[in-house]
Amino acid sequence: MPSMSIRNGFLGYLLPAVVLASAGSASAFQGSPPVANADAKILADFNSRVGEYMKVRKKAGESRKLKKPVDSQASINRHQQILAHEIREEREKARQGDIFTPEIADVFRRLIAQASQGSKGVQMKQSLKHAEPVNLVLKVNRAYPEELPLQSSPPTLLANLPALPKELDFRVVGSNLILRDREANLIIDFFDQAIKKP
């Protein structure tokens, strides 16, 4: 059986090693999270905010038991106007940045910048360059004017952004990115300097 002095000597050697290893692990654990994890958390916040909007939208749509529009354009337009009005009523205090917070907008800018790289990025820039210019003063809860073209968002750009519920879409207006309610034709939120002009 080992003597007491041998055992104490072994423990004296082992404990500092354990302490050093623990300190190293703690230091690594307390380090700043990777950018990807931070972005994932911010994008989860975006999805949560979109989810909250969808709850408001559902409530607005049910408030007057809106009927699905029939094939006539007049019926579709009337449905759109009523739904937009009801959403505005539910979101009367909505402001720019409620969904696209500064942190979320920054992540989107990085994702869009990534989409603009490489050969697909060239196609995206060409698509934006040839798009019909739109001069529009953006405001949350304002309808997207019927007389102005809905500029198509390049597929390469959309592929790099979070998926949206089918009722919503992203639209590019100048250098701005808009989150739009398709059925109500309503600007939900937007942020500027999203797109660097080609």
Image (cartoon, rainbow, N blue to C red):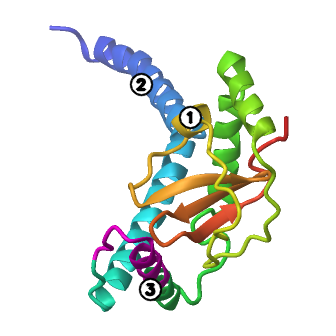
Give the camera-side residue of 12 and 115: 115
Residue 155: mark: 1
Q: Does residue 135 appear in the picture of this structure?
A: yes
Q: Give the magenta part as a residue range.
A: 68-82
Q: Could you give the CA–CA distance between mark 1 and mark 3, rounded to whole angstroms? A: 31 Å
* Residue 40: percent from left, percent from top: 50, 44
Tell which residue pokes out farthest to the front in this image.
72
Main SS, magenta residues: helix
Q: In which quadrant of the rendered image does the C terminus lie? A: top right
Front disc: 1 or 2: 1
On-image quarter of the N terminus: top left
Residue depicted at x 31% and y 91%: 64
- Say what amino acid the circle numbered 2 marks: Val
Asked if marks 1 and 3 touch (Cβ < 8 Å), the reply is no
Asked whether residue 74 is drawn in magenta, I would say yes
Q: Decide which of tag 3 and tag 2 comes sooner along the chain.
A: 2
Disc marking residue 82? 3
Q: What percent of the width, then of the height, locates residue 135? A: 82, 62
Mark 1 or mark 3, earlier in chain: 3
Task: Inspect the image, locate mark 1, and give the three-letter code of the amino acid beneath it.
Answer: Pro
Placement of 93 over or under 19, stated as above or below: below
From this viewpoint, is residue 34 visible?
no
Crowding at label 2, few (<14), some or many (≥20) Cα neighbours within 10 Å?
A: few
Q: Which residue occupies 52% across, 34% down?
A: 159
* Kind of residue indicated by mark 3: Ile
Q: Which numbered tag is attached to residue 18? A: 2
Q: Quadrant of residue 150?
A: bottom right
Q: Is residue 21 magenta?
A: no
140 lies above or below 88: above
